[in-house]
Image (cartoon, rainbow, N blue to C red):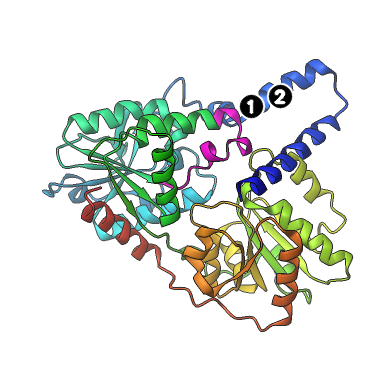
Amino acid sequence: MKDQIRSYLQAQLYAEVCERDRQSVDPLSKAIYDRLRELYWTVSRILRQGLKLIGWRGKNYTPPPWMLVDENLIYGSARRRVLIDMTPTARSDIGTGIQRVVREVVKAAIESGEGFPVMIIDGRLCVYARGAVEPTPLDIRSGDTLLLLDSGWLYISEYRPIVDLVRARGGRNVVCLYDLFPIVYGAAFPAALRANFKKWFEEIILPADGVAAISHSVANEFEEYCQERRLVRIATQQLGVWTLGADFTEGVKSAPTTRVRAIVEARVPFFLSVGTLAANKGQALCLSAFEKLWAGGGDVALVIVGRPGWNTTALERRLREHTEHGRRLFWFSDANDAELQNLYRSARAVICASYAEGFGLPLIEAAHAGAPVIASDIEIFHEVGGDSITYFDLLDPNSLMQRIVEMLASKKCAPPLPVLSWKESTQRLLDTVDSHGL
């Protein structure tokens, strides 16, 4: 399987190289372009947010109502508080899968009274108390648990003093582990992101008091990765597993927008792919399967929902300039929750073509919306979907095409998966943190 993935990645990267070669620029400009692409993710965040060098003080930031916390939850007598970090999401919420998780967990934790959100502002953990004009610095006390739920590797230099302070004050650090892709499949990621994640893994995850993996597959991979490389973790570190939820709390009853209505009300059935454009998500493979269908006379549409990711310039051009774009091929890079929910509910099926996933949230969201699922034959999808979904051979567009044809010939039937709400998912996370001593 690893050889398959390696070959697939090489093909994707070769397409990127060819894409750059299409540009009529001199060698010096190409060299400068290459350097800028390697630094893209780090530099772009610095320029947009001005955070790394000058610190983020929360000025001009207005927290949404669901982020506000009652003072009795912050300063109550409970010995053990769960402080849920959401620094990256508060600074720049661009609607990624991790940020969806953070938002929903924070909302449910506040509602249950078992946790509340914190963020790093000017080097300190702060909280937005209901009725307060400005964010309030939080004094860490013995028994506190700092739950690093967000994508903290984006701002790793700010986290090290925070986790050290929590430990020094008698608190505990628990890290949520979504996957190990930047270090396991490094070729698919920019050098800057790989370096940041590697540092996060070594300096934050390995010394953490607890690790909360989003699936047994991720937990097993973490254990195997550490054992194979003989990495040193603290002797008391606990590893737990929790399951993600799926429900759209906003816009679930909204009517389709004009662009979505044109798709869901068309006579042509459509299949849906959801996720940031990235090599591991398999959108290029998915498109290849549909090109085979269209070439054979198949009248079916493909809708891709996902923001541009890394090393996807060639795929983006392929989507934008495709002869079927706007007819039987649609790419939405900015779909909101209401649009996504309408697409889920009307899709003939949802396709999860990833070669690697930490969980596969679209699979659960599809089941919640009543859509069948076609997924890659990989361990995590079997863990989440079991026998309730349809599988195709890994990285094989012909196998995927065959499953699509079979799906079109059968009656639409939602997979009978036990879908957790975000309230239930959050409670499992908090229970895991508590029961396993995480």
Element type where label 1 sits in the image: helix
Q: Nearer the viewer, residue 360 or 252?
A: 360
The residue segment tinted magenta is 177-193
Whole-percent x, y for residue 44 in the image: 59, 29
Q: Is residue 41 magenta?
A: no
Q: Is residue 138 or residue 42 the one in the foreground?
A: 42
- Determine the image quadrant of residue 256: bottom right
> Circle 1 is placed at which residue position?
38
Occupied quadrant, residue 371: bottom right
Q: Residue at x 40, y 25 (%)?
A: 157
Q: Is residue 3 above or below residue 361?
A: above
The residue type indicated by label 2 comes to Asp
Residue assigned mark 2: 34
Residue at the spot 43% in from the left edge and 73% down from the top edge: 418
What is the count of numbered marks?
A: 2
Amino acid carrying mark 1 in the image = Glu
